[in-house]
Every structure is written in structure tokens, then in C-alpha cells.
Image (cartoon, rainbow, N blue to C red):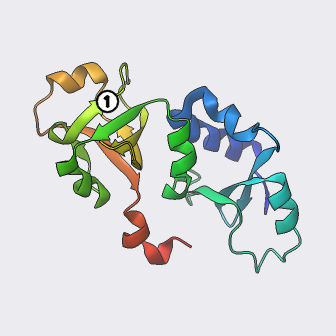
């Protein structure tokens, strides 16, 4: 368990900022206590300084997890957000998409969202922006990348993909073995 290097921090913040914008500061500077990001076995964890002090008392080979896992670095050095951070990303999301009930299960099975399944989208969402996907009741289901801007969504054909799937809450069931 160690702090992120400058290059890792840059890569990590670029990815998370795609989804939360400038609210990234709110994740670190929370009321009451400071929160930090730490790297352990190529995974980035988000935890309070109190949790960090408790975690340092364990042998790092025996330590499996601590805090909330935000994502992991791939072998090529890219960062991939995991579904574990959905509550934090959804809380500070800059751009949001609501999916209709008939496309909700499709998204939860790992498929992209087409225009037919799009219920609403945040105004002025640019193309390739990170979006949090909600059902029509306002429950966060996952996140993805907007393949079309808000203006283009109105003009594209009904079968066109408007949100590229990245992660969803159905992963807990599909990838149960790999979640550790």
C-alpha cells in the first residue's frame, strides 16, 4: 500500500474527472476528515486517514482490501474505473443519462444504450463525456461514455448507440470471481 506516483495520479485524476468534473476536490476534502487515495496491488482505494492508519497495522501481503476500490491500473498503465465507486461518482456526476425501463436490463447485462432506450440526458452533454446511467426512478445503475452529444441524440436513428457501456451493477453477479 502506497501513495500514487505523479504519473499514476495524473492518469487516475484524468479518468475520474471525466465523470465528476471539478468536484474531484470534494472527494478529498470532506467535512470532518481528510480522505486519500492509495495504491495496493494495482488497485486504487479511497479511504479516510483513520482507515489508513488502521490498515498500516496489517502485513501488506495479507491485506486484501481496505476502503472503497475506485478502479485498477491495467498492465499497459491505463486506469479503469470499477463499479465499486459508483456511489461516489453518482453523487458528484457532471453528466447524467436516464434509461427507460425496457432497456434497463439490457444495460445491466453489459450492453450499450441505444436511442430507443434513452429516457433523458443532461443538457449540453458533449460527445465522449463520462456519464452516470440512472433508471427512471433515479437509482444509479452504472456509468459509460456518451457516444453522441445531447444535440446529436435528437437527430440520430433509433438504433444508434448513444452511451457506450463501461460498468454496471450487474457486474457483481456476472464477474463475481474477479471482483476481489
Judging depth in this view, the residue of 95 and 101 nearest the camera is: 101
Residue at the (38%, 24%) spot, across then down: 125
Q: Is 178 on the left-hand or right-hand side of 141?
A: right
Q: Against 60, is 120 above or below?
A: above
Residue in view at x 70 percent, y 60 percent: 67
Residue 104 drawn at (x, y percent): 25, 52
Q: Which one is nearer the viewer's eye here, 70 or 170?
A: 170
| Nearest the eye: 152 or 31 | 31
Q: Label 1: how many residues lie within 10 Å, few (<14), some (14-19) or many (20+)?
A: many
Q: Which picture quadrant has residue 70?
A: bottom right
In the rendered image, the vertical position of residue 65 relative to residue 37, given as above or below: below
Q: Is residue 136 left or right of residue 59?
A: left
Q: Which residue is mark 1?
A: 121
In the rendered image, residue 82, in percent from the top left (x then y), is placed at: 51, 56
User: Which residue is at 45% across, 75% downward?
Assistant: 176
Residue occupying image coordinates x 17% and y 50%: 102
For the N terminus, the quadrant is bottom right
Number of numbered discs visible in the structure rendering: 1
Residue 130 in percent (x, y) is at 44, 36
65 with respect to 125 (left or right): right
Task: Find the residue positioned furthest to the bottom.
Answer: 62
Left or right of 133 in this view: 26: right
Quadrant the C terminus occupies: bottom right
Residue 123 x %, y %: 35, 20
In this view, 19 is above or below 155: below
Secondary structure of the residue carrying tag 1 is strand
- Residue 75 appears in which quarter of the rendering? bottom right
Amino acid at each position: 500500500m502506497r501513495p500514487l506516483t505523479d504519473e499514476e495520479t495524473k492518469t487516475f485524476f484524468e479518468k475520474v474527472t471525466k465523470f465528476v468534473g471539478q468536484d474531484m476536490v470534494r472527494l478529498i476534502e470532506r467535512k470532518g476528515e481528510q480522505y486519500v487515495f492509495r495504491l495496493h496491488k494495482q488497485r486504487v482505494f479511497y479511504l479516510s486517514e483513520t482507515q489508513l492508519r488502521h490498515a498500516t497495522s496489517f502485513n501488506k501481503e495479507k491485506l486484501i482490501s481496505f476502503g472503497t476500490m475506485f478502479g485498477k491500473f491495467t498492465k499497459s498503465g491505463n486506469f479503469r474505473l470499477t463499479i465499486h465507486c459508483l456511489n461516489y461518482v453518482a453523487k458528484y456526476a457532471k453528466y447524467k443519462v436516464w434509461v427507460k425501463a425496457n432497456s434497463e436490463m439490457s444495460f445491466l447485462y453489459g450492453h450499450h444504450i441505444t436511442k430507443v432506450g434513452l429516457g433523458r440526458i443532461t443538457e449540453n452533454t458533449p460527445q465522449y463525456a463520462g456519464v452516470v446511467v440512472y433508471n427512471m426512478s433515479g437509482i444509479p445503475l452504472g456509468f459509460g461514455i456518451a457516444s453522441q452529444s445531447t444535440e446529436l441524440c435528437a437527430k440520430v436513428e433509433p438504433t444508434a448507440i448513444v452511451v457506450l457501456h463501461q460498468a454496471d451493477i450487474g457486474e457483481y453477479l456476472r464477474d463475481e470471481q474477479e471482483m476481489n
